[in-house]
Every structure is written in structure tokens, then in C-alpha cells.
């Protein structure tokens, strides 16, 4: 379990120390590079950097879907840790309907981000 958490802790430390707006060694979004449009994940690194510094509102402006999804991700992470600690299978069993719902949310959010005039269409500088 510790070996799996170590890379996440190192990534969080790097993200905490190096703002993705100032340091350009982070991976860039292939979808954004190819189309100039924002995908559902665009702004996630900047949002996580802001979140690690406790700037919740700023994180929300960079990627609201990511911030809304954090409690669910936290629940999945806590469940994974609990299952590993109790020697139970840790892979979550998602119903296909949930995965289809997630896909609809991701596509819908991507579409909303690319409609001109909506606040979601712009990332903060
Ligand atoms: Zn993107």
C-alpha cells in the first residue's frame, strides 16, 4: 500500500512546489494542442496546485468538474486503502450505467467548456 501512495505523494509535492503556470515541464493536453479547445481535464494540474495551497475558489475556476469529483475520488481512495488494509479485493465494481453516466458528464462538460460566452469556456491566466 505504501509503495502505491509514494508516487502520489511525490507528485503532490512536485505540484505543490512548482506552479504549472510558471513551470512548463508538465505534460500538455494533446486535445487542446490539436484543436485549441478545452477538454474535461484541461486546467486540472493548475486546479490541483491551487487546491494544494488551499485556494479552493481558484481551483474551482481552473476545473470545476475536478473539484466536484474530489469527494468521489476521496471516497474511492479511502475505500481502496480500507480494502487493502483488510486484505479484501480493492477493485471497485462499477455498474455499466455509472460508466456511461461518467462518459456523458465528461462529454457534456467538454461541450460546455467550448461554448463561447460561458464562464467555463475560459481558463484563468
Ligand atoms: Zn485538455
Image (cartoon, rainbow, N blue to C red):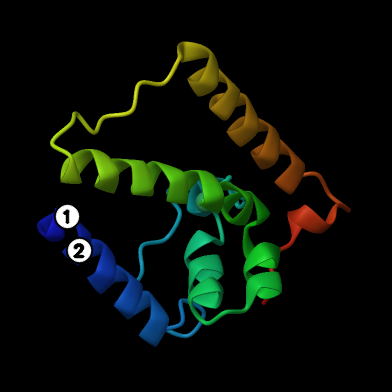
Depth check: 82 or 2 in front? 82
Q: Up-down: is 17 above or below 70?
A: below
**Are circles 1 and 2 on residues that touch, CB within 8 Å?**
yes
Residue 76 x %, y %: 40, 42
Query: The C terminus is located in which quarter?
Result: bottom right
Q: Is residue 16 above or below residue 91?
A: below
| Mark 1 and mark 2: Cα distance apart in space | 6 Å
The residue lying at 36 percent from left, 48 percent from top is 78
Q: Locate residue 78 relative to residue 43 in the image: left or right.
A: left
Residue at left offset 45%, top offset 51%: 74
Can residue 93 be seen in this snapshot? Answer: yes
**Tag 2: Cα neighbours inside 10 Å, few (<14), some, or many (≥20)?**
few
Determine which quarter of the picture holds residue 11: bottom left
Q: Residues within 10 Å of mark 1 (few under 14, many from 20)?
A: few
* Marker disc for residue 7: 2
Question: For the point 76% across and 41% down, which residue is it?
Answer: 112
Nearer-the-camera pick, 13 or 119: 13
Percent position (x, y) of residue 91? 26, 29
Q: Residue at x 36, y 69 (%)?
A: 26
Where does label 1 land, which residue? 4
Q: Which is nearer the eye, 21 or 36? A: 21
Place of residue 30 in the rendered image (x, y in percent of width and height, measured from the top left): 43, 49
Residue 114 visible to an observer of this rendering: no
Amino acid at each position: 500500500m505504501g509503495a502505491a501512495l509514494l508516487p502520489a505523494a511525490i507528485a503532490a509535492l512536485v505540484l505543490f512546489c512548482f506552479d504549472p503556470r510558471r513551470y512548463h515541464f508538465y505534460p500538455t493536453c494533446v486535445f487542446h494542442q490539436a484543436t485549441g479547445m478545452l477538454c474535461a481535464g484541461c486546467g486540472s494540474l493548475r486546479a490541483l496546485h491551487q487546491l494544494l495551497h488551499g485556494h479552493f475558489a481558484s481551483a474551482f475556476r481552473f476545473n470545476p468538474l475536478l473539484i466536484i469529483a474530489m469527494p468521489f475520488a476521496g471516497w474511492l481512495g479511502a475505500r481502496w486503502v480500507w480494502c487493502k488494509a483488510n486484505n479484501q479485493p480493492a477493485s471497485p465494481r462499477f455498474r455499466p450505467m455509472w460508466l456511461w453516466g461518467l462518459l456523458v458528464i465528461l462529454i457534456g462538460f467538454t461541450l460546455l467548456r467550448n461554448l463561447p460566452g460561458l464562464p467555463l469556456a475560459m481558463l484563468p491566466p
